[in-house]
Image: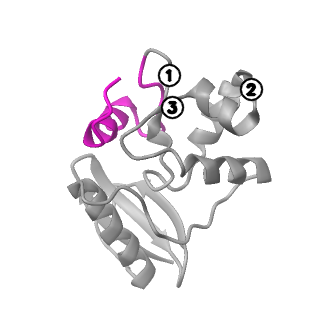
Amino acid sequence: MNYSILKTSVGNIKIVADEDIVLKVEFSDQTKEFPNKTSEQAKKQLEEYFLGTRRGFDLNLKMQGTKSQIDFYKKLIDVPYGTSMTYAEISKKVFGTENKARVVGNYLSKNNHLIIIPCHRIVAKNDVGGFKEGKRIKEKLLKLESVYI
């Protein structure tokens, strides 16, 4: 398994990839790399994101989960840079009802492609809401995109 490490203002990001697909993007304490072309391509795009010159990603992702989860992640990618949606709003968009906000939270917590699948853009009605890596990191990612809650 190959991976690259990107050092950012919010911590080290590990990009795991095989020959032509990104398997996982996660925060990590690792510093040693075993890169390949795909992990380095993803690293470059994430560097551009953190520099503020990239607003979307052009990567092949291996999404994992149930069909419902994968469908959800595909729609989550469409939440634009510099915007946010509440749990209820994304629930309505994906499931046709605002009553699946807990399902949304559960699916967000299982996102294996942090930042690229922008779960940080989903917020609570009056707060930033939860985040797998902690509220502080979520707040920094939102601030990077000029989203203030």
Specify the farthest residue to the right.
67
Where does the image place residue 56, in percent across and percent down from the top left? 41, 58
- Disc on the earlier residue, 1 or 2: 2
Of residue 53 and residue 140, the one placed in the foreground of this image is 53
Q: Mark on residue 124?
A: 1
Q: CA distance from mark 2 to mark 3?
A: 14 Å
Q: Mark on residue 97?
A: 2
Q: Secondary structure at mark 1?
A: loop
- Disc on the earlier residue, 2 or 3: 3
Q: Residue at x 39, y 46 (%)?
A: 81
Q: Residues within 10 Å of mark 1 (few under 14, many from 20)?
A: some
> Which residue corresponds to mark 3?
85
Where does the image place residue 46, in percent across and percent down from the top left? 33, 62
Q: Residue at x 30, y 57 (%)?
A: 49
Quadrant where the C terminus is found in the figure:
top left
Left or right of residue 97, residue 148 in this image? left
The colour scheme of the drawn protein is: one colour
Q: Splitting the image into 4 quarters, where does residue 35 fall?
A: bottom left
Q: Residues within 10 Å of mark 3 (few under 14, many from 20)?
A: some
Kind of residue at badge 3: Met
Left or right of residue 91, residue 95 in this image? right
Kind of residue at badge 1: Ala
Span shown in magenta: 127-149
Specify the farthest residue to the top.
126
Q: Secondary structure at mark 2?
A: loop
Q: Is residue 12 magenta?
A: no
In the image, residue 122 sits, relative to residue 28, either above or below, namely above
Q: Secondary structure at mark 3?
A: strand
Kind of residue at badge 2: Thr
Q: CA distance from mark 1 to mark 2?
A: 16 Å
Q: CA distance from mark 3 to mark 1?
A: 8 Å
